[in-house]
Image (spheres, rainbow, N blue to C red):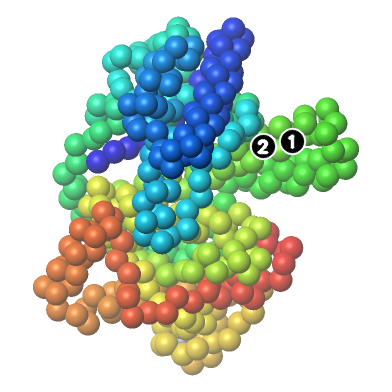
């Protein structure tokens, strides 16, 4: 199993200059190779071979493995185009790159061009300061030095990891309702709030975006504002992802079976509900939970989301409510309970019913097939039509908090 690790780099001024110059050379090299490819094809109706590419990148001024990496990338892109054409598929031909579009330096082999200890030693930049916030498991295969739009540098390692034995998990079952007011409500009554600082960052982002739109095109101020916006975008994405990972880890270590609604988050975003923090997070969160479940020894079950908010978890009666009714009050059985907790209990009940409705054997078999196919422990109800989360549909825009 391959895993990637991304760490922030803190190059010195001199190193950054050197890194940028290598990106520049990479861009020039890419464009030169592409130009040669097109010329050769015009003349001979043939593309350069792998070894012809390798000869062309000699003495480029880049570290040899990095230069070979560029040749390899272009070679593969051309082959993909040829293959697609043969199969009658549409496929773009590789394009010339500007400096902004050339973002990474690739090191295909370990122990030759780089080594990682307290600092990252990379040919020919020397030792670069790195913030290694977690340990890399397994053998490092490749390194990519990456410059983001914000101007920050990162090291991305790809490591080959032995598959871990799934842990035994003796935790109980839980239903989770994802919401707009509260990020998640559990069927045991626990509420997980959205991180406060996320909202603050988002407000700042809105401010900077307004500022950016006022700046004159091509001006120095606009460039600066653009960088500011990119920085904030990155910060928000990181903060959000960090929160989602931590929440997923906590739930997976505590529960062996997690029930959630099956959400069509892409549809939600397309309908213009994609502005709030939550809508975007829901899909990512379910994804994280599903792929981490296997190693945690847990299972994630997705259930039909229809009427989970309306249905009474006590007696099953449908009780109409608007988004602003925060309480579920059942006229039939008298149950009075927080609306999100009511929904979370319904979600858990649906998952449990589904399990007991089928024989245990066939169910286990089905789960194993799912694991084999997708590499995760997510199991989905194939018979169900995806439907949009009711709250997202009924929420007027601009009131998502
Ligand atoms: Zn009831």
Measure how far apart labels 2 and 1 are at the Cα level. Answer: 6 Å
* 357 left or right of 333 in image: left
Place of residue 219 in the rendered image (x, y in percent of width and height, measured from the top left): 85, 31
Place of residue 159 in the rendered image (x, y in percent of width and height, measured from the top left): 30, 31
For label 2, the SS is helix
Quadrant where the image shows the C terminus = bottom right
- The residue carrying pointer 1 sits among few (fewer than 14), some (14 to 19) or many (20 or more) residues within 10 Å by Cα, namely some
The extreme front residue here reads: 43
Task: State yes or no: Cβ of the residue under disc 2 lies below 8 Å from any atom of ligand 1.
Answer: no
Q: Is residue 89 visible?
A: yes
* 51 left or right of 6 in image: left
Task: State the residue at coordinates (78%, 40%).
Answer: 208
Place of residue 316 in the rendered image (x, y in percent of width and height, measured from the top left): 42, 87
Quadrant where the image shows the N terminus = top left
Task: State yes or no: Cβ of the residue under disc 1 lies below 8 Å from any atom of ligand 1.
Answer: no
Q: Is residue 47 above or below residue 173?
A: above
The extreme left residue here reads: 361
- Please name whichever residue, 315 or 21, is drawn nearer the observer in this view of the structure: 21
Q: Is residue 86 above or below residue 228?
A: below
Q: Dots 2 and 1: beta carbons under 8 Å?
A: yes
Task: State the residue at coordinates (51%, 20%).
Answer: 9
Q: Is residue 67 visible?
A: no
In this figure, which residue is indicated by the disc labeled 1? 226
Q: Is residue 321 above or below residue 35?
A: below
Task: State the residue at coordinates (38%, 20%).
Answer: 55
Instruction: Report which quarter residue 290 is drawn in.
Output: bottom left
Which mark, by number, is residue 230? 2
Q: Is residue 352 above or below residue 201?
A: below
């Amino acid at each position: 199993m391959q895993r990637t690790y991304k760490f922030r780099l803190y190059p010195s001024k001199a190193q950054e200059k050197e890194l940028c110059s290598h990106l520049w050379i990479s861009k020039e090299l890419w464009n030169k190779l592409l130009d040669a490819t097109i010329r050769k094809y015009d003349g001979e109706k043939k593309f350069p071979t792998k070894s012809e590419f390798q000869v062309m990148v000699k003495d480029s001024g880049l570290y040899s493995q990095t230069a070979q990496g560029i040749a390899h990338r272009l070679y593969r892109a051309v082959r993909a185009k040829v293959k697609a054409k043969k199969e009658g598929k549409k496929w773009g031909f590789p394009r010339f790159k500007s400096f902004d579009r050339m973002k990474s330096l690739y090191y295909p082999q370990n122990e030759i061009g780089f080594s990682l200890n307290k600092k990252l030693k990379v040919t020919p930049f020397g030792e670069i300061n790195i913030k290694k916030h977690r340990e890399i498991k397994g053998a490092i295969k490749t390194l990519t030095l990456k410059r983001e739009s914000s101007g920050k540098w990162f090291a991305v390692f790809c490591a080959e990891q032995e598959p871990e034995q799934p842990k035994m998990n003796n935790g109980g079952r839980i239903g989770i309702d994802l919401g707009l007011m509260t990020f998640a409500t559990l069927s045991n009554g626990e509420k997980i709030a959205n991180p406060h600082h996320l909202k603050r960052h988002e407000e700042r982002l809105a401010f900077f975006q307004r500022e950016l739109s006022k700046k004159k095109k091509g001006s120095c101020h606009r460039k600066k504002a653009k960088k500011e916006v990119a920085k904030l975008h990155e910060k928000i994405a990181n903060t959000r992802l960090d929160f989602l990972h931590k929440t997923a880890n906590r739930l997976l270590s505590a529960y062996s079976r997690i029930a959630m609604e099956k959400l069509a988050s892409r549809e939600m975003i397309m309908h213009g509900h994609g502005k709030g923090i939550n809508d975007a997070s829901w899909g990512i969160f379910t994804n994280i939970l599903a792929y981490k479940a296997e190693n945690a020894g847990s299972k994630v079950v997705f259930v039909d989301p229809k009427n989970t908010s309306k249905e009474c978890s006590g007696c099953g009666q449908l009780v109409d409510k608007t988004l602003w009714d925060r309480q579920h009050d059942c006229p039939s059985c008298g149950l009075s309970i927080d609306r999100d907790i009511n929904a979370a209990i319904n979600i858990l009940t649906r998952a449990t019913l589904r399990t007991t409705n089928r024989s245990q054997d066939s169910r286990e078999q089905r789960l194993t097939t799912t694991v084999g196919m997708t590499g995760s422990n997510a199991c989905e109800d194939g018979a169900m039509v995806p439907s949009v989360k009711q709250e997202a549909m009924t929420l007027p825009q601009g009131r998502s908090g």
